[in-house]
Amino acid sequence: MDTTVTSPLARKLGCFVALSDAELSVLERLQVRRRPFAAGREIVHQGQSDRAVYILVSGWVCSYKTLPDGARQIVDFQIPGDFLGLRSTLLQTSDHSIESVTDIQVCEVPSGDLLAAFAGTPRLATAVLWAASRDEAMVVEHLAGLGRRAAPQRVAHFLLELGARLALVGFGTKAGYACPLTQYLLADALGLSAVHINRVLRQLRELGLVTFRDGTVVFDDYGGLVALADFDPTYLDQERPLLT
Amino acid sequence: MDTTVTSPLARKLGCFVALSDAELSVLERLQVRRRPFAAGREIVHQGQSDRAVYILVSGWVCSYKTLPDGARQIVDFQIPGDFLGLRSTLLQTSDHSIESVTDIQVCEVPSGDLLAAFAGTPRLATAVLWAASRDEAMVVEHLAGLGRRAAPQRVAHFLLELGARLALVGFGTKAGYACPLTQYLLADALGLSAVHINRVLRQLRELGLVTFRDGTVVFDDYGGLVALADFDPTYLDQERPLLT
DNA sequence: CATCGACACTGCCGCAGATCAGCCCACCGT
DNA sequence: ACGGTGGGCTGATCTGCGGCAGTGTCGATG
């Protein structure tokens, strides 16, 4: 593998499919047209139809659904190297909204360019489809958490999952990571109230497991947290690449 | 459209993409190798790797996740015309289990045959990918329900969604449908206890909205139920076909 | 400097929903 | 006729979590 891997996307896909220099350069060329958004901006609105895909280069984003009664459920957060709106391109309208959490940089990729890249470099297509399947697996895992995990397990599992995802793109370790999320965002994602999130975080901190504070997550006792959350990261990572 | 549409899958896809007789016959030829399973059989086990896709022809199936602590979260139910394990074929291992709810008939389609059919009839590929995106949208909607809807809304929404899906394949109307699910299965899907499901069902029945009894769902007041659940079916159906 | 808004944090109370325990009925197999 | 089983139904009790209301802190802005 190339030692000068630049984009988080290339780093992530490289864990699933060993990419040649030629494939890597196709991937990098997709990401030339950069575009910034300020924090808190709505990138895609629920119900809007959309013919382009975005690749998140830097910053954090959340995709969420607004229920008719006004309540908000965050479906997932996206971090550098993730696609935005990949699925919505097939449906005529997006079933969810996407909003920047921090200031971000995205690359807008017209669906046509993406399909052309797939046609020319099929291994890249496999890698991207793998990433899409992984995203769906995360949503399913999230669903199981909302339905069947108690609040502390749910929070712990969420923080661990984010940590594992960030580690894969080089933004975190088993020691911890920088996390720009507010407790309100956590609440909207985990189906709890912000107040209760606060209580649970304190509890986890007092147990000496994790410290979520000042935009930083510190794993005080990684093993203990994994045990509490029953965290099994096999759905996020591959022990061996899919294609070598 | 052909008047002698046979399989539920063809009927469903026909709502999204107008299929020619030639495309329909390709679709029907995929479904020749039928295979029965008895009720309560595990078709795919969580963690198992799998190189074939199934198309459900008759009967009901559920896909679920078992958490390490033994709790079960049903991700979705599949009804005739739905794919089983379409996503898992890309991941090396399935992240969920699949089990028959009733006696069923499935068609086992080797991934190779499916891909060949896609290559020969690209409109079919589009239709199937559309169906996959719709499945994912249902999971997202389900996620929002678990996170943000109270028990009565959740149950009502679930029954309405099932009704709309069944109507699309000809197994139900706005009046009601046959539903082989037990209250235990509902509980595992909706993140509630079976006891509480029972109470909520009674409540909805006493309000004159739905009657869930003896394997049958009767919509006593469809409009009222829609209002209670804030049900918006646009994510399930298209007002106009994607390709004509 | 005062003010204001965003975010974190806390105690108290009420409620939705879990858990426990038990009953009824229909359908089995012997 | 019998017990066993699986599903539906119910009441009593307990509890996790949300709602509310209020405090504290920091950073931005006049």
Image (cartoon, coloured by chain):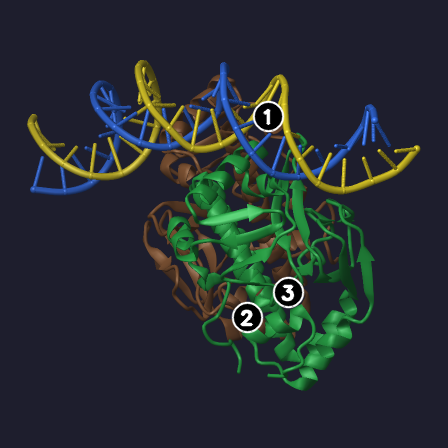
Chain colours: A brown, B green, C yellow, D blue
The three-letter code of the residue at mark 1 reads Leu
Residue to which mark 3 is pinned: A124
Query: Mark 2 or mark 3, which is nearer the start of the sequence?
Result: 2
Above or below residue B132? Residue A111 is below
- Residue at 59% from the left image edge and 83% from the top image edge: B1
Label 3 element class: helix
The image position of residue B201, as x and y in percent, is 51, 41
The image position of residue B58, as x and y in percent, is 72, 61
Residue to which mark 2 is pinned: A114
Residue to which mark 1 is pinned: A228
The three-letter code of the residue at mark 2 reads Leu
The image position of residue A8, as x and y in percent, is 54, 53
Q: Nearer the viewer, mark 3 or mark 1?
A: 1
Residue nearest the viewer, comparing A124 with C4: C4
How far separated are the C-alphas under marks 1 and 2?
41 Å
Query: Mark 2 or mark 1, which is nearer the start of the sequence?
Result: 2
- Residue at 48% from the left image edge and 70% from the top image edge: B238
Evaluate if marks 3 and 2 touch, with contact meaning CB atoms under 8 Å apart: no
